[in-house]
Image (spheres, rainbow, N blue to C red):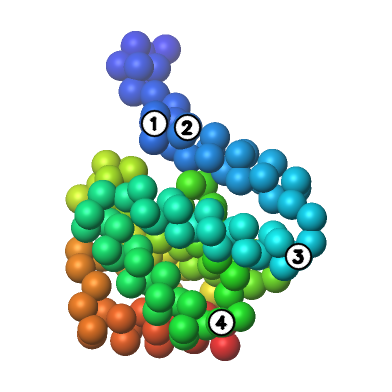
Amino acid sequence: MDTDESSAHEGFTAEERAAMKDHAQELKAARRRSSSADKAAEAERDVLAKIAEMQDSDRIMAERVHAVVSAGAPTLAPKLWYGMPAYALDGKVVCFFQSAEKFKSRYATLGFSDQAKLDEGTMWAAGFALTEVTPETEARIAALVKRAVG
């Protein structure tokens, strides 16, 4: 075996391992909650707390995304997913926000899972880079989220 090939595989990054640990904690916390109303209220508090912890630009964008998703698709329930804000329908994540800072990326991401009804022909976008959330961006997010749950 070539040593260059074996040393090229590094496994998960520290950020990916941290996200997996966050997800395990989220699952444990969800199991401990009692009623569905308690679970929903606590999940939203968790999302808002996670957003509040973000760096300035990520926090501002996540706050706007949260407001747009909540207003545009009230059937989606906020929850944490791998330590990031996500929005689920019947417990299944439809869309999510990833901060640039947490994943050491040059931009934040608004992503959609395979649960989102964004299908368009044989190929469609499932993730969008965000550098700023302008009124035009908000309108586009609102339209995508409505379509995703439509």
Amino acid bearing label 4: Pro
Amino acid bearing label 3: Ser
Above or below: residue 117 compared with residue 54: below
> In the rendered image, which residue does mark 1 sit on?
13
Q: The residue tagged with tag 3: helix, strand or loop?
A: helix
N-terminal of the two: label 4 or label 1?
A: 1
Residue 107 place in picture, x, y as percent:
23, 56
The structure residue drawn at horizontal position 40% and vertical position 60%, both measured from the top left corner, is: 97
Mark 2 neighbour density, 10 Å: few (under 14) some (14–19) many (20 or more): few
Q: The residue tagged with tag 1: helix, strand or loop?
A: loop
Given the current orientation, which residue lies at the most extreme right position? 34
> In the rendered image, which residue does mark 2 sit on?
17
Amino acid bearing label 2: Arg
- Given residues 104 and 25, the one toward you in this image is 25
What's the distance in space between the residues labelled 2 and 1, CA to CA?
Answer: 6 Å
Look at the image and tell me whether residue 61 can be seen. yes
55 to the left or right of 88: left
> In the rendered image, which residue does mark 4 sit on?
74
Q: Which of pointers 4 and 1 indicates the residue nearer the eye?
A: 4
What's the distance in space between the residues labelled 1 and 3, CA to CA?
Answer: 35 Å
